[in-house]
Image: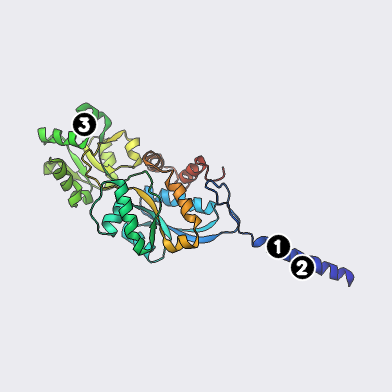
Amino acid sequence: MKKLAIALFALILLTVLAACGSNDTSTPSGEDSESSSSEARGKVTVGGKAFTEQQILSKITSIYLTENGFDVEEASNMGSTVVRSALENGQIDLYWEYTGTGLVIYQKQEVETDPDKAYEKVKENDKENGIAWLNKADFNNTYAIMMKQETAEELGITTISDLAEYVNNDPKKLTFASNAEFYARDDGIKGLQNHYGFEFPSQNVVKMDSGLLYNALKDGQVDVSVGFATDGRIKGFNLVILEDDKQFFPAYNGAPVVRQEVIDQYPDIADLLNNLADRLENETMMTLNYAVDVEHEDITEVSRNWLKEQGLMAL
């Protein structure tokens, strides 16, 4: 009986010790934490839109938050209005948004070309919606007018004003490629031409799917095209962005947007997301997009490799 009692006591003691150990949910909260706790500090859902840059941003965020002790669920590949509604309805907790989209599309405000002013306006306006805009990253995925580098250099075109002057002197010389949205919007090709004082003849404007624009320009099917400033194919196809010297295009800087109640519940999540935002700028996003779109690397691997390079997760 004495042996049985000793055995039972030992079993109870081991159970108590195990229970005490399981309550330790501490996780690294430092900026450059390299390991996560075995016990999640909370569950969050990370949303995202359905194009490469957004998929990369969502994946980087999901991996980083997981590395820092969060139980993360991913909900990507949504349209802009769908992901915004999901945030407002509490179906997701956070995602990356662009200042221009938030200001013009969701808040119905005037276009703002100054990045800092656009950020401050959209951030302030969304407070009443219970949505927090965290740090504005230095990548601006706005519209861009592009040419092949060799063509631009040959014609001496470096700015949109240079392009306008060239078209006015010889309207039928250059062909312009546009997606349907940019062609139809008042702040698309119509507004651009009005702002800079030129006009492509209608027969010199070719409409095509957004995904075909870069290849059409690279292959010489068109001379000028609209695109997006952080697209990796600009780098991969030796294209150049003409300077928007009269500041027509709105600012579209990326930033993490989070439901305020999530920040109230997990205050350190803001610091973690700001740490990501502060490390991202145009060249970085273009390189990451290039790896996926041109070199066809796996999004998860691209995201993990970048986090490792930044010292944000274990090697």
Query: Element type at marker 3?
Result: loop
The reply to whether residue 222 is in sight is no
Tell which circle, 3 or 1, labels the residue nearer the N-terminal end.
1
Asked whether disc 1 touches disc 2, contact meaning CB atoms under 8 Å apart, the reply is no
**Which quadrant is the C terminus positioned in?**
top right
Identify the amino acid type marked 1.
Ala
Q: Which residue is mark 3?
A: 157
Give the Cα separation between the discs numbered 2 and 3.
80 Å
Identify the amino acid type marked 2.
Ile
The outermost residue toward the bottom is: 1
Tag 2: Cα neighbours inside 10 Å, few (<14), some, or many (≥20)? few
Q: Which residue is mark 1?
A: 18
Q: Is residue 159 left or right of residue 137?
A: left
Residue 12 is tagged as 2
Query: Element type at marker 1?
Result: helix
Q: Residue at (20%, 37%) from the top-left corner?
A: 160
Residue 142, x across and y down, in percent: 29, 46
Give the Cα separation between the discs numbered 1 and 2.
10 Å
Tell which circle, 1 or 2, labels the residue nearer the N-terminal end.
2
Does 281 sit above or below residue 18?
above
Give the Cα separation between the discs numbered 3 and 1.
70 Å
The reply to whether residue 215 is in sight is yes
Query: Element type at marker 2?
Result: helix
Work out whether residue 50 or residue 141 is closer to the camera in this orientation and state it: 141
Tell which circle, 2 or 3, labels the residue nearer the N-terminal end.
2
Does 314 sit above or below residue 39?
above
